[in-house]
Amino acid sequence: MQNKNVLLLVTGSISAYKAPSIASGLQKNYCFVKVAMTEAATKIIGAAAMGGVTHEEVALDENWFTQSQKVPHINLAKWADIVLVCPATSNTIAKLAHGISDNVVTATVLAASGMGKRIVIAPAMNCNMYESKANQKNMEICKEYGYEFIAPKVGLLACGDEGIGHLKSTREIIGELLAPYKKDGE
């Protein structure tokens, strides 16, 4: 597999705690990884942890236009071969479905979409939210735009419910994300 630039966009699902493992796993699969995070995501996993894993500056809402890389949502979108929104909240999916770009994550996806980049979304949320008509419709709209989904699995959720909405394992996510680039037998 040829090295890929993967932009990991982390949103405020409790599953954000898996983001450092996902970034590390991608690097072990010969990917270059950069990260952008919503403000809500930083309340679950710190930007310092993500920067420590990737050895790259993390794009945040709070430093969107003050960090060393000006206009990060455009520059990161240009850099990326693959944009992975993981975990993706129902709020973020709704914003992506309707072109709302009010944070560094959603603005980056909108820019990357306009550039024809591969966009993959890995939802993680309560089963009732996941199965709601609004969320299902928003995912269908995103699919119409060409966005791909790594479907969640059935499991024990943070709220104690059991159902669909549990983020897949790091290994499963990376496997699905990189499958199109693997040669036969790799």
Image (spheres, rainbow, N blue to C red):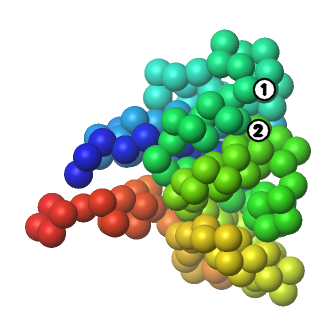
Q: Residue at x 87, y 55 (%)?
A: 100
Q: Is residue 86 visible?
A: no
Dot 1 amino acid type: Trp
User: Residue at coordinates 60% horizontally, 71% vertically from top-left?
Assistant: 146
Q: In the rendered image, which quarter is residue 13 located in?
A: bottom right
Horizontally, is 86 left or right of 174 in the view?
A: right
Against 138, residue 7 (above or below) is above
Spot occupied by residue 160 in the image (x, y as percentages of width and height): 72, 70
Q: Tell me how far mark 1 sits from mark 2, CA to CA.
A: 7 Å
Q: Secondary structure at mark 1?
A: loop
Q: Are marks 1 and 2 in contact (CB under 8 Å)?
A: yes
Give me the residue at 67% from left, 53% from top.
114
- Residue occupied by mark 1: 64
Q: Which secondary structure lies at badge 2?
A: helix
Residue 8 drawn at (x, y percent): 56, 44
Residue closer to the observer: 15 or 33 = 33
Q: Which residue is mark 2?
A: 104
Q: Position of residue 24 (x, y in %)?
A: 40, 39
Along the viewing direction, whichever of 124 and 63 lies nearer the viewer: 63
> Does residue 140 sit above or below 106 in this rendering?
below
What amino acid is labelled 2 in the image?
Answer: Val
Q: Dot 2, how many residues are within 10 Å of its Cα: few (below 14), some (14-19), or many (20+)?
A: many
- The residue that appears at 40% across and 66% down in the rendered structure is 176
Q: Residues within 10 Å of mark 1 (few under 14, many from 20)?
A: some
The residue lying toward the viewer, choosing from 121 and 17, is 121
